[in-house]
Amino acid sequence: MGIKINEKESDDKKEIIDFLQSNFLGMGFKELQDHVIYRENCVLCGCCTTLCPRIGLADQEPALIDYDPECSTCFRYCPQTYYPEELFEKELFKENIKKSYPLGFYKQVLTAKSTNKEILKVAQNGGVVSTLLIHALENKLIDGVLIIDRDDNWVPNPYIARTKDEILACAGSKYTVAPSLSIYKDAINEFKLEKLAFVGMPCQIQAVRKLQLYSPLSTELGKFTLIIGLFCFSNYSYDLMSKFVQEDLGILLTTVEKIDISNGRFYVYMKDGSIKDSPIKNTKKYNWVSCQHCKDYCAEGADISVGSVGTMENGWNSVILRTDTGTSLFNDAIMAKKLVTSPEINLQKLEKEALRKKTRITPIDEKTLEAMQILNISDFETKTYTTLMSLGHVSDSILSKVMKTDKTLIQKSLGNLERLNWVVKTNEAYSCVNPTLVINNEIHKLKMSLSERIEKLKSEALPNLETIYAQNNHVKMDEKSD
């Protein structure tokens, strides 16, 4: 299951493995702070804290608690640093694969639900995730699951579930960010688990895939053999529970049975059977900051992605089968009559929601736009570049739709930017070059141009002007230059 490392590796795979194994990048926690934490881009996956005993959590943020030897482990395994998507896509998605810009690579999209009443009783929707985990555990495909539990006050707690009952106890969505990977070291060092499953958010999966390719903690234990991703438009800080649910809605957290988000509303189900709801827009201020820049709605890097959007009725899950690993497990659960499926799915609605997240952009402010004008490119080209920066790797057609501009104008702008080495084209799609490289290159060109103009002024204009001035004016001593 998962990514296998063979003796004869491709050059691309060797490159990423070498990167993950390297201890000599000259980087440490400071670089992680500068590039991820201080830029409010941390997804709170807990990967850095589980791999490095010198890193802890302070106010929901990784913090250095001891001397940093700059081994760079935290930087290398962070999901927000180097992640070669094309390499992982090549390794994970092979035969009988489809690709959709909103959904990513997949083999099949359908709906399913558990046949187990005990599971359905505690499940968020159709119980597919719990059913698959229990089936994998009972068939010894996994030894344990990294999952999220919660206490009576809805504080999320990372948990290693090793039995059916423990998996069921963790069922249901928590809607609060939690460092799911913070207990990875315990799965290895304390429980000696060899084969692990992971259930989590799309953003966290990139860290898991890195660990799957090469784990710095063990070559024998803690191997990720199953990765299940959950649909996610945006996650929340715990303030959603402590302030919104408890203070704004006036609901005691210990009385809450279940929380759900559906059709633009936030629902709170109480243990006494009553329900309270509010428009989802009222929860926006509690969104986790880095979620606003994430483009992955349906966990495109998972073996199986599961959610509720797209189902034709309540009590079912939408399921996206992506890899051979995920498809094999899912089909085996069907044959064991633990799941029932239906081809009826509102694929258009699912793709629309995924596309809505994937095409969110960060608009450029006027201050930046004004500063960029010194580079002698149009405002439209600047906006094309910054929009592409928000979108990632997309076709000119997608860029045209997002910018609501004629495709011909977009192509012309991209052509100019490509000649300037601001964007690159790969497989009929464009991506922006790192702005540090772009701006530094433009500054160098400005310096070279200005230097040439200064030299021309000094060598060609100044001598002539000095002669004319000396011939027609009395030169004062204090006017002489060195």
Image: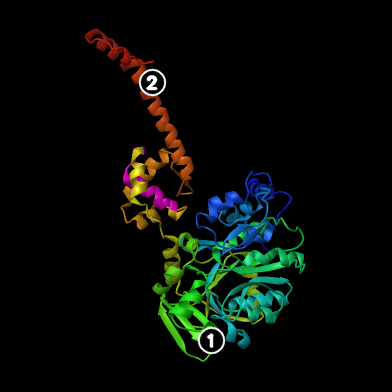
In the rendering, at what x and y percent does residue 267 appear?
Answer: 46, 81
- Look at 73% across and 58% down and name the residue there: 217
Q: Against 108, is 375 above or below? A: above
Q: Which residue is mark 1?
A: 255
Q: Is residue 386 magenta?
A: yes
* Residue 8 falls left or right of residue 227: right
* Residue 114 falls left or right of residue 102: right
Label 1 to label 2, Cα distance in Å? Answer: 77 Å
In the rendering, at what x and y percent does residue 334 appear?
Answer: 63, 78
Q: Amino acid at mark 2?
A: Glu
Q: In this view, which residue lies farthest toward the bottom?
A: 272
Element type where label 1 sits in the image: helix
Magenta residues, start to end: 375-389
Which sits in the foreground, 127 or 70? 70
Chief SS of the magenta region: helix
- Look at 28% across and 10% down and name the residue there: 467
Q: Against 355, is 268 above or below? A: below
Look at the image and tell me whether residue 89 can be seen.
Answer: yes
Q: Amino acid at mark 1?
A: Thr
Q: Residues within 10 Å of mark 2 (few under 14, many from 20)?
A: few
Which sits in the foreground, 352 or 100? 352
Which sits in the foreground, 13 or 476? 476
- Look at 55% across and 68% down and name the residue there: 177
Name the N-terminal-most of marks 1 and 2.
1
Q: Residues within 10 Å of mark 1 (few under 14, many from 20)?
A: some
Q: Which residue is mark 2?
A: 455
For residue 453, what is the image quadrant? top left
